[in-house]
Amino acid sequence: MSEVGASIGPDEVLRRLPHRFPFLMVDRATDYREGQSIMGVKCVAASEPHFTGHFPENPVMPGVLIIEALAQTGALLMSKTLNADISKTVIYFIGVDKARFRKPVRPGDVLEMPVSIVKQSRGIFKFEGEAYVGGAKVADASFSATSAPKEAE
């Protein structure tokens, strides 16, 4: 049965994504629609290590980390849709196209990231994602991911 508009709290994010501080870029999610879309949420904290050098007098979240936050939101959507067990499955970010950065993201901002699956074929998911702060679009991108069995350690 499909969950429509469900929320995903921090505990479930940690169960569904392998990332941890300082590289976990999704705090929670709302509006999960199985196999369709999700809204990732990231609270941008001044204590994040990249702000030390990017830039000391004018802290700005690096664009590549905004793309990573979108990709992790897509991975969360994919993980929940596939009911993937992250102890046995790895979701790989495999490509990004048409990334655009429109406004800076600063400490204290809350990123809201609607991500939709636009195509799913032969194990590859293609996504469209946008990032907003206070209703203003700060970035958008098309990207793709796939999953594979986790290699034995």
Image (cartoon, helix red, strand yellow):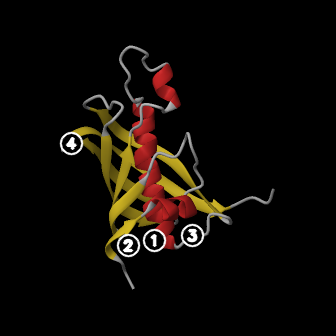
Looking at the image, residue 143 lies above or below residue 150: above
Which residue occupies the foreground of this view, 8 or 141? 8
What is the spatial separation of the Cα atoms under label 2 and label 4, in whole angstroms?
A: 26 Å
Q: Classify mark 1: residues with Cα within 10 Å, few (<14), some (14-19) or many (20+).
A: some
**Quadrant of the rendered image containing residue 127:** bottom left
Q: Which residue is mark 3?
A: 84
Mark 4: which amino acid?
Answer: Gly
CA–CA distance in space, label 1 to label 2: 5 Å
Q: Amino acid at mark 2?
A: Glu
What is the distance, in whole Å, between disc 3 and disc 2 at their CAs?
13 Å
Q: Secondary structure at mark 1?
A: helix
Instruction: Read off the residue under disc 1.
Output: 81
Q: Earlier in the sequence, mark 3 or mark 2?
A: 2
Tally of numbered discs: 4
Mark 1 or mark 2: whose residue is earlier in sequence: 2
In front of the other: 12 or 121: 12
Q: Amino acid at mark 1?
A: Thr
Q: Which mark is residue 34?
A: 2
Q: Are marks 1 and 2 in contact (CB under 8 Å)?
A: yes
Task: Work out which quarter of the rendered image holds the C terminus and state it.
Answer: bottom right
Q: What residue is pinned by disc 4?
A: 134
Q: Secondary structure at mark 3?
A: loop
- Kindly report the distance in space between the C-alpha atoms of the residues bearing marks 3 and 4: 32 Å
Percent from the top left, x then y, of residue 50?
Answer: 49, 27
